[in-house]
Image (tube, rainbow, N blue to C red):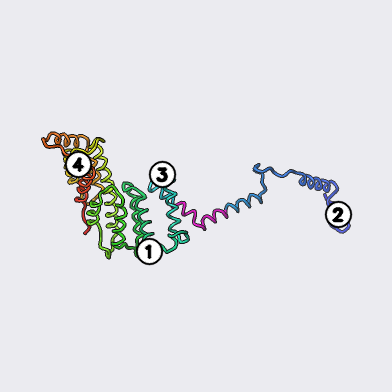
Amino acid sequence: MAAPSQDGRNRPSPPAAKMAAYEKRRAAAAPAPAAGSGLAEPARAGAAARGLGTEAEFLLQAGVTAMVREALLKVLEARPEEPVAFLADYFEKLVLSSPGAGGEAAAEPPGLPQRLARALWYVRLAHHSHRTAFNNNMGMAYECLSASGRRKRPGVDGRLYSELLRRICRPGAAPEDVVAALLRKIQCRDHEAVPFDVFRYGVLTCFVLLEFAAKAGTLYDVLDGGSGPADKRVCQAVLCTLEDALGASDFSVPIRYLEAGSKLGPDCLALAMDRALQERKLSVAMSREEFLKKATALFVAKVKPID
């Protein structure tokens, strides 16, 4: 217990004073915690926490968090074969379309070429078989070409719509005259407002035509056997069989044309080819270009024109 002093204050007894001095010397001689030992002072831990908070706030304020999240969502939607290349292309397009981008693209405000290039990039992100991703990308492309912007009612005129279709088909596996015939059926007048359903139908039809032409080219490679031009009788028989299959499909849904073509199994084609070879006619060759032109013309003939 402390004894009272002459001025009335309580002073520590001699043993207590010695204990206090000992604790002071012990604290001064204690070694500092080693780095990484987990014994850092609370103040240091608090400073680190404040630093992490500042970094997270910076990412949010700079828009990096939302940007990376959107990029990852695009990867999940499109499911590209090369995700790293997809992300590189995505961020490159993002930089070129930003207001502060350098180069010729930033020398002028985003105009028709930039909007068309970005819309074309969107529609090529996902294959049409991935319907959810494809439809989402169609919406983004439609918005890119909208002259009114996001704050007003969106709308795409026939001039931009038709130019986008031409860019989708160029270059492609389909012959140019066949592409021209298709565009005449699905284009709109320059001054017309193109609804989203028509926009999606035209874009989808172009992609299906390109895939149909690629499959027709693969079929011709089977017919010629790698030894030169294929027999015209065999090619004509296959084209007739393909026409019958397309005739049974739904004209309003372009994807059904691919489904109809896929139903041409080996047995069906083998019978048609065998009947053709049994005909007593002079054997004449059919070139790859002629076969592709006739096959894709069958496709265009079945496409429902836009009213």
Q: Residue at x 51, y 56 (%)?
A: 60
Q: CA distance from mark 2 to mark 1?
A: 86 Å
SS assignment at label 3: loop
Mark 2: give few (<14), some (14-19) or many (20+) Cα within 10 Å. Answer: few
Image height check: is 25 above or below 113? above
What amino acid type should be assigned to the residue bearing mark 4?
Answer: Met
| Residue 198 point in image, percent of width and height | 27, 57
Does 210 appear in magenta?
Answer: no
Task: Give the residue at mark 4.
Answer: 286
Query: Which of the two discs, 2 and 3, labels the residue nearer the N terminus?
Result: 2
Marks 1 and 3, how far apart at CA: 32 Å
3D distance between C-alphas at marks 4 and 2: 123 Å
Q: Is residue 140 visible?
A: no
Of residue 277 and residue 229, the one placed in the foreground of this image is 229
Residue at the disc numbered 1: 149
Q: Which residue is mark 2?
A: 4
What amino acid type should be assigned to the residue bearing mark 1? Answer: Gly
Q: Are marks 1 and 3 in contact (CB under 8 Å)?
A: no
Disc sitting over residue 82 in the figure: 3
**Circle 2: residue type:** Pro
Q: Earlier in the sequence, mark 1 or mark 3?
A: 3
Q: Earlier in the sequence, mark 2 or mark 1?
A: 2
Do the CB atoms of the residues marked 2 and 1 lie less than 8 Å apart? no
Q: Where residue 261 sits: x, y (%)?
A: 23, 42
Left or right: 29 with respect to 246?
A: right
**Residue at left 29%, top 55%?**
166
Q: Residues within 10 Å of mark 4 (few under 14, many from 20)?
A: some
Looking at the image, tell me whether mark 1 or mark 4 is earlier in sequence order.
1
Q: Position of residue 172 (x, y in %)?
A: 30, 49
Q: Magenta part of the protein: which range?
A: 53-70
Between 203 and 184, the residue placed more toward the observer is 184
